[in-house]
């Protein structure tokens, strides 16, 4: 993160676990968003669709569950649907209605000051709503590195905005393990390296500039990658790190009170957990935008997810501009000097 964030904010991230931007969305925008999500169909949950043709989750759940997933996909789908229904009343991904409006307000308030790196992709957004009966994800975890659906790095930054107050009284706070407390962060950039190694020598997968186009990868090649020893090793690291953090670092997590509309930056690849929501009168509501730093990998972004466009916004932190493209951001068009070297620890 040290070459992504401005030095001062890197320190804040490293020691506190997140960056308090000092920015809050306007009350009118928060209210507009609340109203929009209130009208969204109750029980809408976009998570289960990520589990179709997604093998790593099955692997992580251990052998027995893994077998169930492989042998009885319908049953597995029901299990996953129940898991997420128990967590959220509403989980809406990639609506992308508010990304531009949110960034308009952020850029007006000098959002670029947080960054050292020149370009950041605003990939997609997520809305999560849960009542006290739905527990959200209260177990300590880091968001597993994924390539089936997204392009993810170990230094992704989430613009995290509670749409209701989260505090000691209501609960619902985000609990974060700052990097200074533990070096058990999963080496997610290794996934990009492995992915590049697996497909860069396959001309059919490449575009005219020699970049891997995920949509061009043949299913059998992807399956071979999923079954490769290196990929399984990475998942094993994920599993072991999570177990160690749950065992030894439980007391080092930091929770803070954040008011509705407050804009916070955190890295979903650090360990975190949601605090139980205890509010009776209304639900916990969180809005997030996932930001990706641009590395010098020869991997292009996917352009759609479950039929919806994504990865189409690029923030220029030098000019404070927000560009919207008709397709996913083309990494081959960004000069190498503006990309981050992919370091694998
Ligand atoms: Fe998470």
Image (cartoon, rainbow, N blue to C red):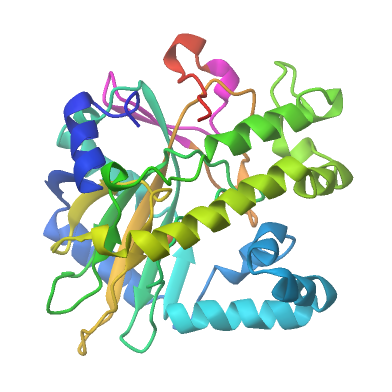
Picture quadrant where residue 21 is located: top left
Say how many tags the image has: 0
- Could one spot residue 295 in this view of the protein? yes
Please provide percent x and percent y for residue 74: 77, 80
Judged from the image, the quadrant occupied by ligand 1 is: bottom left
Magenta span contains residue 190: no
- Residue located at (82% from left, 49% from top): 223
Single out the residue that lies furthest toward the front.
Answer: 248
Q: Position of residue 11 (x, y in %)?
A: 20, 34
**In the picture, residue 77 is in which quadrant?**
bottom right
Viewer-proximal residue among 94 and 158 = 158
Q: Is residue 327 visible?
A: no
Which residue is depicted at the point 74% across and 76% down? 64
Please check the rendered image and state whether residue 319 is part of the magenta-colored stretch, yes or no.
yes
Q: Residue at x 38, y 68 (%)?
A: 128
Q: Quadrant of the N terminus?
A: top left
Q: Point out residue 27 in the picture as x, y percentages from the top left corner.
A: 13, 60
Residue 199 in the image: above or below residue 286: above
Position of residue 270 measured from the top left corner of the image (x, y, whole percent) = 38, 49
Residue closer to the observer: 109 or 198: 198
The furthest residue to the right: 220
Foreground residue among 77 and 344: 344
Residue 54, placed above or below residue 192:
below
Q: Which residues are magenta?
A: 313-333
Tell me if residue 309 comes above or below residue 296 in the rendering. below
Left-right relation of 298 to 42: right
Q: Is residue 218 left or right of residue 35?
A: right
């Amino acid at each position: 993160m040290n070459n992504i964030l401005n030095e001062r904010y890197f320190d804040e991230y490293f020691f506190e676990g997140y960056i308090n931007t000092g920015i809050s969305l306007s009350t009118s925008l928060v209210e507009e968003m609340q109203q929009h999500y209130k009208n969204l169909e109750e029980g809408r949950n976009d998570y289960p669709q990520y589990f179709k043709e997604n093998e790593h989750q099955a692997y992580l759940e251990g052998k027995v569950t893994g077998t169930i997933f492989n042998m009885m996909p319908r049953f597995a789908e029901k299990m996953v649907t129940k898991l997420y229904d128990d967590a959220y009343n509403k989980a809406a991904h990639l609506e992308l209605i508010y990304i531009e409006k949110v960034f308009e307000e952020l850029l007006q308030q000098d959002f670029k000051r947080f960054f050292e790196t020149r370009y950041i992709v605003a990939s997609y957004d997520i809305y999560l709503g849960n009542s006290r009966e739905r527990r959200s994800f209260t177990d300590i975890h880091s968001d597993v590195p994924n390539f089936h659906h997204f392009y993810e790095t170990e230094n992704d930054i989430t613009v995290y905005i509670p749409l209701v107050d989260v505090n000691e009284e209501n609960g619902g706070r985000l609990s974060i393990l700052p990097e200074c407390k533990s070096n058990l962060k999963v080496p997610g950039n290794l996934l990009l390296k492995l992915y590049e190694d697996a497909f860069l020598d396959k001309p059919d997968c490449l575009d005219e500039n020699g970049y891997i186009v995920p949509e061009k990868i043949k299913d059998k090649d992807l399956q071979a990658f999923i079954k490769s020893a290196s990929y399984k090793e990475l998942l094993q690291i994920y599993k072991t790190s999570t177990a160690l953090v749950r065992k030894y670092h439980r007391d080092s997590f930091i929770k803070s009170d954040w008011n509705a509309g407050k804009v916070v930056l955190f890295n979903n690849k650090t360990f975190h957990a949601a605090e139980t929501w205890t509010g009776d009168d209304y639900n916990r509501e969180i809005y997030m935008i996932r930001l990706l730093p641009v590395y010098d990998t020869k991997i292009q972004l996917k352009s759609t997810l479950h039929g919806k466009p994504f990865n189409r916004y690029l923030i220029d932190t030098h000019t404070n501009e927000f560009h919207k493209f008709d397709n996913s951001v083309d990494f081959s068009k960004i000069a190498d000097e503006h990309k981050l070297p992919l370091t694998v620890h």
